[in-house]
Image: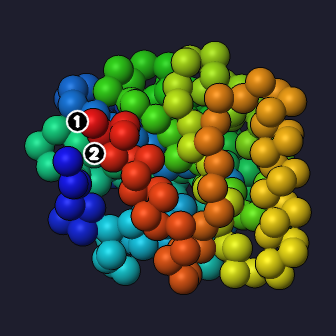
Amino acid sequence: MTIAYQKAYFLLSVADIKQLPADQGIEVAIVGRSNAGKSSVLNRLTQNKRLARVSKTPGRTQHINIFVLDDKRRLADLPGYGYAKAPLSAKQKWQKTIDLYIKQRQSLKGMVVVMDIRHPLTALDLQLLSYCYKQHLSVHILLNKLDKLSKTAVTHTLQKVKASLKNDDSRATVQLFSALKGIGIEELRKQLDKWYG
């Protein structure tokens, strides 16, 4: 089955998981550190540069933004984590929101974790991955911004990340990606198609 990602549209933005749409169908969440490029990934996936607001300011996404693909499938853009200048109260609220979302959302089928390839597997990334595994949630890692590194550095980083995940008995899959150039988009769509079934 081919999913028309380009038909995605914004449904709503919520600060509390109680405000989310009915917990049915299939939802895939996109999450990552502030400034990893989540919004750019969403825009590249849907071929719509204006779908998700891209900001040069880290920590701009502070709510869960829901995008509809069709009557059974949704994408959820979760707040970015790890923004150093955010007030502690905001960080704690985002953490609680993400925790509750992962734990309680029955329609959540998988998580796309967007990482800047120059800074992969930070302590916060590993904490998120560990939490996802405890909840038996499938994870697909996008090493985004590969256009910022040389081919040698990209290859080395990918090998390092795969080795680290293997050592942690991770069930996560990982791929290279460039939201800017569209590299890796077909691989991402194939992974999402599996989850959306």
Instruction: Give the class, few, some or many, for how many residues have Cα within 10 Å of label 2's Cα (few <14, many ≥20).
Output: many
Going by the image, does 194 lie left or right of 74? right
Q: Amino acid at mark 1?
A: Pro
**Residue 185, image x and y in percent?**
46, 67
Q: Secondary structure at mark 1?
A: loop
Q: Nearer the viewer, residue 65 or 5?
A: 5
Q: Amino acid at mark 2?
A: Arg
Residue at 64% of width from left, 36% of height from top? 172
Going by the image, does 156 lie left or right of 80? right
Residue at 80% of width from left, 78% of height from top? 151
Instruction: Give the class, few, some or many, for how many residues have Cα within 10 Å of label 1's Cα (few <14, many ≥20).
Output: few
Residue, disc 2:
74
**Residue 17, image x and y in percent?**
38, 31
Residue at 17% of width from left, 38% of height from top? 72
Give the number of the disc on residue 168.
Answer: none
Residue, disc 1:
21
Does the CB distance between marks 2 and 1 fall below 8 Å? yes
The vertical placement of 111 against 115, above or below, is above
Mark 2 or mark 1: whose residue is earlier in sequence: 1
The vertical placement of 13 against 36, above or below, is above
